[in-house]
Image (cartoon, grey):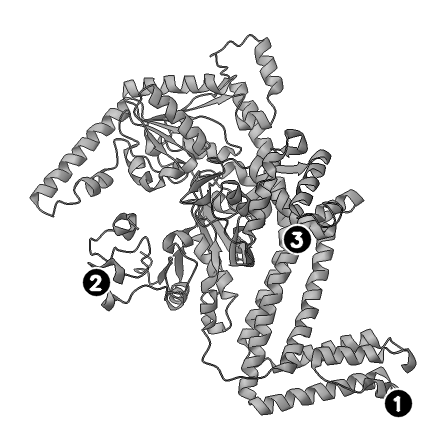
Amino acid sequence: IYRFLGMSVGVIVHGLDDDQRRAAYACDITYGTNNEYGFDYLRDNMKYELRAMVQRGHNFAIVDEVDSILIDEARTPLIISGAIDDKSDLYNTIDTFIPALAPGDYDIDEKTRAASFTESGNEKLEGILREAGLLKGDSLYDVENVTVVHHINQGLRAHKLFQRDKDYIVRNDEVVIIDEFTGRMMPGRRYSEGLHQALEAKEHVQVQPENQTLASITFQNYFRMYGKLAGMTGTAATEAEEFGNIYGLEVIEIPTNLPVTRIDDDDEVYRSAAEKNKAIIALIKDCRTRGQPMLVGTTSIEKSEQLSEMLKAEKVPHQVLNARYHEQEAFIIAQAGVPGAITIATNMAGRGTDIQLGGNADMRIRQELADIPEGPERVARIARIRDEIARLKDQALGAGGLYVVGTERHESRRIDNQLRGRSGRQGDPGHSRFFLSLQDDLMRIFGSERMDGMLQKLGLKEDEAIVHPWINRALEKAQQKVEARNFDIRKNLLKFDDVMNDQRRVIFEQRIELMGQDTVTETVADMRHEVIDALVAKHIPEKAYPEQWDAKGLREAIQQVFNLDLPVDDWAREEGIADDEVRERIRRTTDEQAAQRAVRFTPEIMRQVEKAVLLQTLDHLWREHLVMLDHLRQVIGFRGYAQRDPLNEYKTESFELFEALLNRLREVVTSQLMRVELVQRPPPLAPEDDLQSLEETHIDPLTGENEIVDEDAAPWQPARNGRAVAAQIDPKNPATWGKVGRNEPCPCGSGKKYKHCHGRLA
């Protein structure tokens, strides 16, 4: 339609080279995934030539499933990182200490997901560490033990706050995170600050090296760069305040295509999880008898498998859909609408899943008729499948449509609403009900002890449920409180984030400006003069007599920075000498040196060297600055104990760090250019090739997986990623295929995607 109207349309997908990306971004309308846009932005700001960049500004963005991207995923950064030193032995050693601790040795706060050691725990650990030869000095909290303290804190969190099969699973000798919102595995995504390594040590799998962040941005900050922003989702009404406050977006409700006929029952609340599960199984059996398809939503892999075991014990046929079985997701979802089908799922089956009553005709045709060629027989079989599905759909509609059961309330009402929304689509009948117990996480963490006592006094017997609209309202209020608390946390974090975001914008704009200049000789000269001014001001106080000057210190500083031995001591003994005269002499000497170097190497080569040194030094110092800000952010909260506002303190300190970064940039660039010597070597790699060893991390919110890693199962590379040239590929010999993307056509010629063909064996 757009092309018919005379507009150009581009698509950004994984595996495109820079030229293809540039062409797609140059179109009037560009489609793509959020993480592709974000990583292109970060990669553009790691390049060394303006013409190598692919994006062309940020004007208007329309975001699908906007609440998932701008609220649930708002705080998860896109990260480009590189490996640093291997400390796997230290993680494994410290992991052996944690099980020796008794419950009184540490405090756990589930609400804030925090863990800390008590006095007795600290004493016990000091003894253990001293025996192991890991404790330096007398106390665990001496400054030289800061690394060990960090490691034992992460070890405690890994053991006491993170549960296997809920927060992560172990698969193929790897710890894989599970997204709490989608219930999907997120291969390639790793917890930061050594927590992932602590989990690997806990599960006795190979400890991967830690990564250093080289560039990062959150979706929140990326999408706020656009001049205009819009989006759509089925569950934005509950977050209208946040959209308005943070993004300046108004939420407008659009009526459904057909009236919703789904029946949403009041929640049933039981005293214990066992009573709740009994009631759920009774309802599942009833639905199966009546031929009503059923989707049962759980909050974790562990709970979905517990329910599955109970159904197996009762001999009730069912399917389980969680992160362990995500390969079969499409098939399980395709059959979830068949009359009498029981599907137990984590949050994976929530957002964006379309369960068709009677089954999915296209999926069945693909699977059942894969080996039947085109012809009358195939046409007849397709017609039979479509007739059968129409009959099954009528049967499912007659039984009441899809029945959605929630086994627990999520902290966010939107997640619950997404689960309900799988039923009653396009005017179909449907049913939904949530079963809760006072042992559920939401009820347990956010206060149900009083409710338990009250229910006992009211005479609530075993296996009895309390069902009343008041209970629904009370639960909704609890969820609203949690959502409001999470919103406050996000709002507060955003204020901190804005500080780094402003600095990032300054650095990235400065880089683009430098890359756009033919020569940076003038910029480099200004930097050199500013360094001289700073050195002179430091060693020659204003209006001071020459005998008060630190001439020796100035001479040493000039030697260190400019690689020049100037007779500053002799100048200081001259009659009538002033600081302006000294400054001018140093400037004249350094400018002459720079001019001689330009003549020796030719101005053209010197221009290239200056630009390369300036950009590379800026990148290196910016990476160090990111680490410093990260560390500052972790400890700035303690300023609150001194009655100081941590946010204002953070702004002040980060500004001082940023000024120090700029001063250091001037000094390092000047120092390197005053010492530069050219050596004949083979041509270096193109700058983009330096990015090959880097890793990218972010999750596509719709799939819950790190799409970049999933596509190639390797760190990002330019399009020359080891894929064999077409002329060299032998369809019968997989050894000639090179690296094949999971979604590319299989080189064997079957017509299937690689992941559905030979990739299943890889």
Mark 3 or mark 1: name the one nearer the start of the chain: 1
Between tags 2 and 3, which lies in front?
A: 2
Q: Is residue 250 visible?
A: no
Q: Relative to residue 3, is residue 89 drawn left or right?
A: right
* Residue type beneath disc 3: His
| Image: 161 above or below 592 | above
Q: Are marks 1 and 2 in contact (CB under 8 Å)?
A: no
| Image: 472 above or below 349 | above
Q: Relative to residue 133, is residue 508 drawn left or right?
A: left
> What is the CA distance from the residue labelled 3 to the residue labelled 1?
49 Å
Q: Secondary structure at mark 3?
A: helix
Q: Which residue was labeled with disc 3? A: 631
Classify mark 2: residues with Cα within 10 Å, few (<14), some (14-19) or many (20+): few
To which quarter of the image does residue 225 belong?
bottom right
Q: Which residue was labeled with disc 1? A: 574
> What is the CA distance from the residue labelled 1 to the residue labelled 2?
83 Å
* Residue type beneath disc 2: Asp
Q: Secondary structure at mark 1?
A: loop
* Residue type beneath disc 1: Glu
Q: Is residue 632 visible?
A: yes
Q: Nearer the viewer, residue 727 or 387?
A: 727
Q: Secondary structure at mark 2?
A: loop
Q: Quadrant of the N terminus?
A: bottom left
| Image: 246 above or below 180 | below
Classify mark 1: residues with Cα within 10 Å, few (<14), some (14-19) or many (20+): few
Q: Are marks 3 and 1 in contact (CB under 8 Å)?
A: no
The percent coordinates of residue 519 (x first, y second) are 57, 81
> What is the CA distance from the residue labelled 2 to the residue labelled 3?
52 Å
Q: Which residue was labeled with disc 2? A: 730
